[in-house]
Image (cartoon, rainbow, N blue to C red):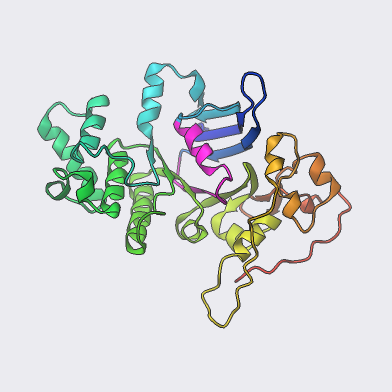
Amino acid sequence: MSAPLLEIRNATKVYGGGFLRTSPVTVALQDYSLTIDAAPATITTIAGESGSGKTTLANVVLGFTELSSGQILYKGTDISTMDKQRLMDYRREVQAVFQDPYAVYNPFYRVKHIFDIVIKNFKMAASKSEARELIENALNVVGMRGEEVLEKYPHQLSGGQRQRMMVARAYLLKPRLIVADEPVSMVDASLRAMILDIMLRLRDEQGISFLYITHDLSTAYQIGDRIHLLYQGQTAERGDTVQVIENPKHPYVQLLINSIPVPDPKIKWGGDSLTSIDDEQMRGNVSSGCRFYPRCPYGMDRCLQQHPPLYTVGAGQHEAACYLYDEQANLPAAKKMAVPA
């Protein structure tokens, strides 16, 4: 049996503390695990509120940030132990598309520079004509033509064009995995649909997997195969995307989905708030237990003693980290929370 494409084992990232341990500590990611199989290609969504650890996860996968503890393995090899050549292969096969289509370009260069530098660094072409052909093929995948955009400066392109070019730049290297960090949050609705469709085609036609990071559950529902919902750096619930969103089990995920307005003027939106509750102090200690405890309607003493493990709550590896699903414990029955159909 072949090794998974990407495997994250008990990843923990702690910020602060310093040399003398005098500054405040924030646990951005704690004991997080994830597996992306080598085949078939999939779109795995990482979702949650702002500050839930989504971007920290992207940064450690891309190698921008080192873990405090845990491992990230690519094709069975820990990326922290890779030699120079294997690390170069990893960087070629694991690409990124970032949130802000304005900040990733150098305004002093024409936009073709982002392709030229990739081709030069990875020695992808022996001539200018071969390089141009590679670039044109990548641009065609995202519905663009070189003669229309390559000689322009970034400010002469729309945000949607800039973002599609970043997808093309990632595709140019024929990666196995693309880490897409909020790739559609700063473009309008029509271009959002186009970029999501490009991701689906790259998955189905090119065999490229995605780690899709978002706070937008509607786009996660639209394109995601599996979903991991984070709360303050810990996994609250994970499983098949449709199963999790249509039948949430964790109290946080139930509240999160219940906070989405129903598109019907006859139905009054209650808008259960997920903000303005002082529970950030729970992030200052790795052993602080379940961080959702201050906001949970079912909080129990044991929730503060240790963070609950993931319990199987449904088909398709549907799991939730909540003691309500501990069948061996004598727990009160949880009342069903309203979740829109």
Residue under the image location 62 percent in, 41 percent down: 233
Region in magenta: 39-62
Residue 132 rendering spot, x and y as whole percentages: 14, 37
The image quadrant that residue 125 belongs to is: top left
Residue under the image location 52 percent in, 58 percent down: 217
Residue 239 rendering spot, x and y as whole percentages: 60, 51
Depicted 149 relative to depicted 89: above or below: below
Depicted 96 relative to depicted 88: above or below: below
The image quadrant that residue 14 belongs to is: top right
Q: Examine the rendering and report whether any part of residue 235 can be seen.
A: yes
Please indicate whether residue 17 sits to the left or right of residue 159 in the image: right
Q: Examine the rendering and report whether any part of residue 314 can be seen.
A: no
Please indicate whether residue 188 sits to the left or right of residue 106 in the image: right
Residue under the image location 61 percent in, 28 percent down: 70
* Residue closest to the far bottom: 266
Looking at this view, is 137 or 184 the one in front?
A: 184
Per the image, is 90 magenta? no
* Residue closest to the far top: 83
Per the image, is 49 magenta? yes
Residue 202 rendering spot, x and y as whole percentages: 34, 48
Depicted 57 relative to depicted 238: above or below: above
* Residue closest to the far front: 22
Residue 285 rendering spot, x and y as whole percentages: 71, 34
Depicted 192 relative to depicted 229: above or below: below
Looking at this view, is 7 or 62 the one in front?
A: 62
Query: The C terminus lies in which quarter of the figure?
Result: bottom right
Residue under the image location 67 percent in, 25 percent down: 22
Looking at the rendered structure, the number of numbered marks drawn on it comes to 0
